[in-house]
Amino acid sequence: MNNRTIWWNYSVNCIEMIDQTKLPLKLDIIKCLTIDSLIDAIKSLSIRGAPALGAAGGYGVALSSFSYDGANVEELKNILISDSLKIKNSRPTAINLSWGVDRVLNKILREKKIEEIRKDALNEAERIADEDIVINKMIGRNGAALLEDGDTVLTHCNAGRLACVGWGTALGIVRSAVEMGKDIKVVACETRPLNQGGRLTTWELMNDGIDVRLITDSTAGMVMRKKMVDKVIVGADRITKDGVFNKIGTYTHAVLAKENGIPFYVAVPLSTFDRSKREEEVIIEERDADELRMINGSYIAPKDVKVFNPAFDFTPIKYVKALITEKGVFNTCKLVDIIKND
């Protein structure tokens, strides 16, 4: 295994990834040999996080091309278009998945030979993966300038290397600041119902030797009111003209930060910006009810209780102090201009 979250296995021409559903108890690797297995990995959250999904989408198009065993170029192209749509529909809210699929698909549809399609698809997917780490480190450098020595940062869900190909967005800022010699502590919200903060963010930071403390989601207001945190930094799954789509609970933290005078930042690559839509035009994925009703196969609520389990929420841009991107830190009052000119 290499030090990435997702990568291409050249010996068998398949996608490999860390199975994030097994962490922190076990570090396991999944091989995706078919498009269906990739889609299952995406839906089950074995691979998750906007930038990582962008890479998964790109690699998925490459996988589709290598899975074809025929000799008709036009037939392959039709399969690629069909598989691409299936991949994009597997998680509709996070825009990077569609972005990665479309970037590779648009690169290869003019090719005349099957081998050229495969070669170009894989090369473009690898470029997406390589660029992600470079972009994250640029975000990290830009964001680290906002952190003072001794700051405590509250974060939600996991916007670290596990949510990306490597390094991370929100946690990448923390990593960059620590690398610069700053003493930075992190407060990680558990992020119910699947506990990506408790399972993944704490695991990452502890492995890096970065001071992290886990809290329940409902403790965030208390620690902000008592000034136990200096900044809030989260990632994002889509930035629209009017705000931020991110893991459910983000809106609550943003409102609490505003009320308590704590800067709320969103760390995000420009590939996550959606130039065309507003809040009401974005589908918010709703997850299985048993994610709330069960833990480890045992019911913690009545098995027939009604459940509302959205994966994401929307935070109006007025609650966000700035967007931290690879191109710099942008005041959110200029969000429309950022989207137009990125």
Image (spheres, rainbow, N blue to C red):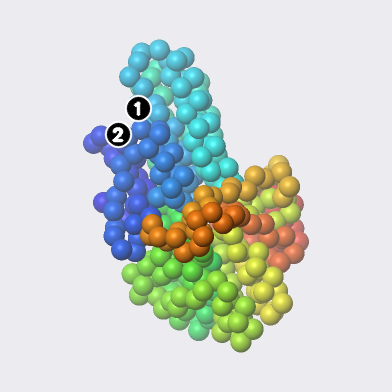
Residue type marked 2: Asn
Position in image of residue 215 (x %, y %): 49, 76
> Outermost residue, top direction?
72
Give the x, y percent position of residue 263. Answer: 65, 74
Residue density around tag 1, few if under 14, some if 14–19, many if 20 or more, within 10 Å: many
Mark 1 → mark 2, Cα distance in angstroms = 7 Å
Residue 10 location (% of width, % of height): 27, 37
- Amino acid bearing label 1: Phe
Q: Secondary structure at mark 1?
A: helix
Q: Nearer the viewer, residue 5 or 188?
A: 188
* Residue depicted at 74% across the width and 64% down the height: 318
Question: For residue 14, which quarter of the picture?
Answer: top left
Left or right? Give the position of 116 relative to 248: left
Along the polypeptide, which appears first: circle 1 or circle 2? 2
| Residue 199 in sight | yes
- Quarter of the image for residue 41 reads top left
Nearer to me, 16 or 334:
16
Residue 143 can be seen in this image: no
Image coords of residue 5 (percent x, y) = 37, 52
Q: Which residue is located at x 35 percent, y 26 percent?
A: 67
SS assignment at label 2: loop
Q: State the mark number for residue 66.
A: 1
Q: Are marks 1 and 2 in contact (CB under 8 Å)?
A: yes
Q: Is residue 189 above or below residue 47?
A: below
Residue at image position (40%, 75%) is 210
Q: Residue at position x 40%, y 65% from top?
A: 199
Task: Please rate how many residues cluster around mark 2, counting C-alpha atoms within 10 Å: few if below 14, some from 14 to 19, many from 20.
Answer: some
Query: Is 128 above or below relative to 163?
Result: above
Q: Is residue 242 left or right of residue 28?
A: right
Q: Is residue 311 above or below residue 146?
A: above
Residue position for label 2:
13
